[in-house]
Amino acid sequence: MARPLAPLALTMGEPGGVGAEIAIKAWNALRGQGLSFFLIDDPLRLEAMGAPVARLSSPLDAVSHFPSALPVLPLPQRVEARFGEAAPRSAEAVTASIEKAVDAALCGEASAVVTNPIHKAALQAAGFDFPGHTEYLAALTEKARMPGGRRRGPVMMLAATDLRTVPLTVHIPLRDVPMALTVDVIVEKALVVAEALTWDFGVAAPRLAIAGLNPHAGEGGAIGSEERDVIVPAVARLRAEHAIDATGPLPADTMFHAAARARYDAALCMYHDQALIPIKTLAFFDAVNVTLGLPIIRTSPDHGTALDIAGKGIADPSSLIAALHLAADLAARRLRS
């Protein structure tokens, strides 16, 4: 008999944003579907929003409470926040929620971590020393062993039904991208992606499409040398040394129409917006942010804190619900492997 799946750990995110609202809406949508999660938050603020709350002493109790109440693992501090405002005073609670979720996943009390959006500037104003969630989760799990000897990331992937994109550089200025791209960076991240596609997504023989950096993929050096000097050697190494079905560099402007998408399992892009614009255009409400190369499973909605609509009751929980479903699917696959 298969072991039961532990509940998912959902973090609070920026309390001035839509995290609590979409968490409550996701609970309402999922409580009859056999999927359970617990939210790490201040129960009092959730009750003030009208949610029936079950205060947990153990994350594993979430499964029994989930059909009738939103299971909440209480934070040690009250969360005082105003909707529409991201304030540094909330930083301690925000990071505590993430740390508790990671701890639960590492000790087996949660099957995966799903993170609500954070506000990076507010956290950094309070001394948070990471560019974003991805890098912070990598630091929190640095000492944990990777499953099956797999390669360590972190690598960000945006996943939707018929498109997966990976930005090879993430939260850095565009002007710094060319210097950050090296043959080793491309190869190492591509190998993490290929392993994840096989072991977590069930793709037996992953096909990777590698984008160019410059218009027209550099046109043989006429519009930039990065393709010739960095991307072409990286693709050659992936094919020759690692037997990876990698193609590129490809002009980014022709990679994302339907016929092109059918030719690969993941598109590796050179910078943040090159990866996120196509997937948010094609699947804004359904795409999920997945962090590859961690010893735990982590997913997240692909949108931000949405401060402009926080507290108005109009936030769409679709991306969070998709993130919860994908986290559960990935956790079940790891449990079977």
Image (cartoon, grey):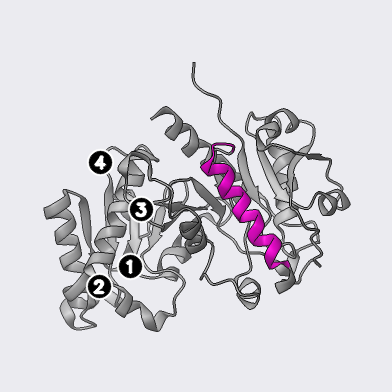
Instruction: Report the number of numbered marks.
Output: 4
Label 2 Cα neighbours within 10 Å, binned few <14 / some 14-19 / many ≥20: many
The residue type indicated by label 4 comes to Ala
Q: Which mark is residue 152?
A: 3
Position of residue 281 in the picture relative to residue 191 (left or right): right
Label 4 Cα neighbours within 10 Å, binned few <14 / some 14-19 / many ≥20: few
Q: Please tell me whether residue 53 belongs to the stretch shown in magenta.
A: no
Q: CA distance from mark 3 to mark 4?
A: 20 Å
Q: CA distance from mark 1 to mark 2?
A: 7 Å
Q: Which residue appears at 65% of the width and 30% of the height? A: 33
Nearer the viewer's eye, disc 1 or disc 4? 4
Find residue 264 and report its horizontal and vertical position in percent: 30, 50
Find residue 42 and report its horizontal and vertical position in percent: 78, 53
Return the residue at label 4.
205
Q: Are marks 3 and 4 in contact (CB under 8 Å)?
A: no
Q: Which residue appears at 39% of the width and 59% of the height? A: 166
Magenta segment, which residues?
90-109
Position of residue 316 in the picture relative to residue 312 (left or right): left
Sequence-first tag of 3 and 2: 3
Q: CA distance from mark 2 to mark 4?
A: 25 Å
Q: Which residue appears at 25% of the width and 72% of the height? A: 217
Q: Are marks 3 and 2 in contact (CB under 8 Å)?
A: no
Find residue 6 and report its horizontal and vertical position in percent: 58, 33
Q: Are marks 1 and 2 in contact (CB under 8 Å)?
A: yes
Q: Is residue 328 visible?
A: yes
Position of residue 224 in the picture relative to residue 38 (left or right): left
Return the residue at label 1.
252
Sequence-first tag of 1 and 4: 4
